[in-house]
């Protein structure tokens, strides 16, 4: 065969120049993968041989990071888990629901979820016939009664600590109720991360993360993770993997690579987030115009005992209620100078949010207020800066 023309050389990929193993995970920025022959393609697409065909189905960078998150969630435990890395935390929640439930099924959850998750359940899934029931998940007898009375409840979904009230629920008790009645359980572990809390230790079936937050930690990518001990669900052709493939909730290799970079310092960051947050929670308790401080590391927090039992430390998230409601909340936010006003959390710098006008603005007010998300509530994602600088900014804002 004659050598190719210059136009063809421009268009073709070069030969892989790699001769030794890379020290850092490469970014596989490719939409598809080339087969040696049609037989290899058939074997991969029929799941007879491991491999890759199309990056929406699977990508080496994405899969490597997903496997690392699964390893974090099972570290020190005698369980096997598999993970998918997805395009956002919302994609992770959507994929587990789409992979497990059908029209007519129901989700039992709490009223103090992240606002976006509540909206997802009520505005997207409800019109398609997947109903959501809100209940106080601290009331274990009530939870069990609801599940026993309604066989259509297929999934028990919860956050602990919850966003933004930092309420904590009993992982072991809720997972046990679900398991004894043949239902599935899922928890959002974004606030705690697997460094502070491992829900598989308590029998939970599925874990979701917004890896955008603490797992990445640097505010430079949007991604999510779904981890489960029900490993067949995650294999090519099966329920949850199929939902990912067909809806297209997969993560990009670039975002996966950024998550991986953040994971390298997760342990160091979570220690600092936690110690800074404890100091700041104590400071807030002393302020005369603060009605309540929500930090599960404080003995005064109603769920302190649950958190102490389930978590290695108490994390970097807290919230507090200002006397004076909405006007006081807005006034306080406008006085912040060192910290950052931003609608996210888990970055290395301190981020402050007003839930009533931001993350939970589309949640009915009666639902918000019934679950402690008041007009004067301020949420703080405590960063890893010097704690005195954070406190000084909060002090001058007061």
Image (cartoon, rainbow, N blue to C red):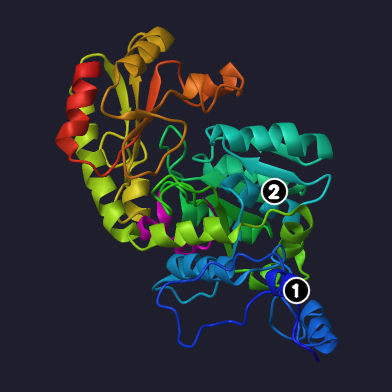
Nearest the viewer among 13 and 388 is: 13
Nearest the viewer among 95 and 298 is: 95
Task: State the residue position of label 1.
Answer: 8
Q: Quadrant of residue 6?
A: bottom right
Residue 393 in view, yes or no: yes
User: Magenta part of the protein: which range?
Assistant: 192-209
Say left or right for 1 vs 231: right
Residue found at x 29% / y 16%: 335
Q: Is residue 201 magenta?
A: yes
Q: Nearer the viewer, mark 1 or mark 2?
A: 1
Residue 199 in view, yes or no: no
The reply to whether callout 1 and callout 2 are in contact (CB within 8 Å) is no
Q: Quadrant of residue 311?
A: bottom left
Q: Rate crowding at label 2 as few (under 14), some (14 to 19) or many (20 or more) other CA atoms within 10 Å.
A: some
Residue projecting furthest to the left: 388
- Give x and y (percent) for residue 262: 39, 57
Residue 27 got which mark?
none
Q: Rate crowding at label 1 as few (under 14), some (14 to 19) or many (20 or more) other CA atoms within 10 Å.
A: few
User: Distance between the Cα atoms at labels 1 and 2?
Assistant: 67 Å
- Image quadrant where one finds the C terminus: top left
Residue found at x 69% / y 83%: 50
- Give x and y (percent) for residue 141: 56, 43
Q: Secondary structure at mark 1?
A: helix
Picture layout, residue 178 above or below residue 54? above
Residue 148 got which mark?
2
Which of the marked residues, 1 or 2, is nearer the chain's N terminus? 1
- Give x and y (percent) for residue 33: 71, 74
Residue found at x 58% / y 18%: 366
Nearest the viewer among 231 and 174 is: 231
- Image quadrant where one finds the N terminus: bottom right
């Amino acid at each position: 065969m004659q050598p190719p023309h210059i136009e063809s050389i421009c268009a073709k990929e070069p030969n892989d120049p790699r001769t030794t193993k890379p020290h850092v995970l490469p970014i596989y920025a490719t939409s598809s993968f080339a087969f040696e022959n049609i037989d290899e393609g058939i074997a991969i697409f029929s799941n007879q041989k491991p491999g890759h065909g199309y990056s929406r189905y699977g990508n080496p960078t994405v899969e490597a990071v997903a496997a690392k998150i699964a390893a974090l969630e099972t570290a020190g435990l005698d369980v096997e888990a598999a993970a998918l890395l997805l395009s956002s935390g919302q994609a992770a929640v959507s994929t587990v629901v789409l992979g497990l439930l059908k029209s007519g099924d129901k989700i039992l959850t709490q009223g103090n979820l992240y606002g976006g998750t509540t909206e997802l359940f009520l505005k997207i899934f409800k019109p398609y016939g997947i109903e959501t029931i809100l209940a106080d998940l601290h009331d274990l007898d009530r939870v069990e009664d609801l599940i026993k009375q309604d066989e259509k409840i297929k999934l028990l979904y919860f956050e602990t600590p919850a966003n933004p009230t930092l309420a904590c629920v009993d992982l072991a008790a809720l997972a046990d109720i679900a398991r004894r009645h043949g239902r599935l359980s899922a928890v959002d572990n974004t606030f705690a991360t697997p460094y502070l809390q491992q829900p598989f230790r308590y029998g939970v079936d599925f874990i979701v993360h917004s890896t955008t937050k603490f797992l990445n930690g640097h505010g430079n990518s949007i991604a999510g993770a779904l981890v489960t001990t029900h490993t067949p669900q995650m294999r090519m052709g099966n329920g949850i993997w199929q939902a990912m493939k067909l809806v297209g909730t997969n993560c990009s290799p670039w975002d996966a690579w950024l998550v991986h970079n953040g994971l390298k310092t997760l342990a160091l960051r979570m220690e600092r987030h936690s110690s800074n947050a404890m100091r700041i929670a104590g400071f807030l308790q002393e302020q005369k115009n603060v009605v309540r401080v929500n930090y599960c590391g404080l003995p005064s927090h109603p769920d302190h005992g649950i958190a102490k039992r389930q978590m290695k430390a108490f994390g970097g998230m807290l919230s507090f209620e200002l006397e004076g409601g909405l006007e006081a909340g807005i006034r306080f936010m406008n006085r912040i100078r060192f910290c950052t006003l931003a609608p996210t959390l888990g970055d290395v710098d301190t981020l402050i949010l007003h839930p009533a006008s931001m993350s939970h603005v589309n949640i009915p007010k009666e639902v918000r207020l019934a679950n402690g998300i008041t007009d004067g509530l301020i949420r703080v994602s405590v960063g890893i800066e010097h704690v005195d600088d954070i406190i000084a900014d909060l002090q001058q804002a007061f």
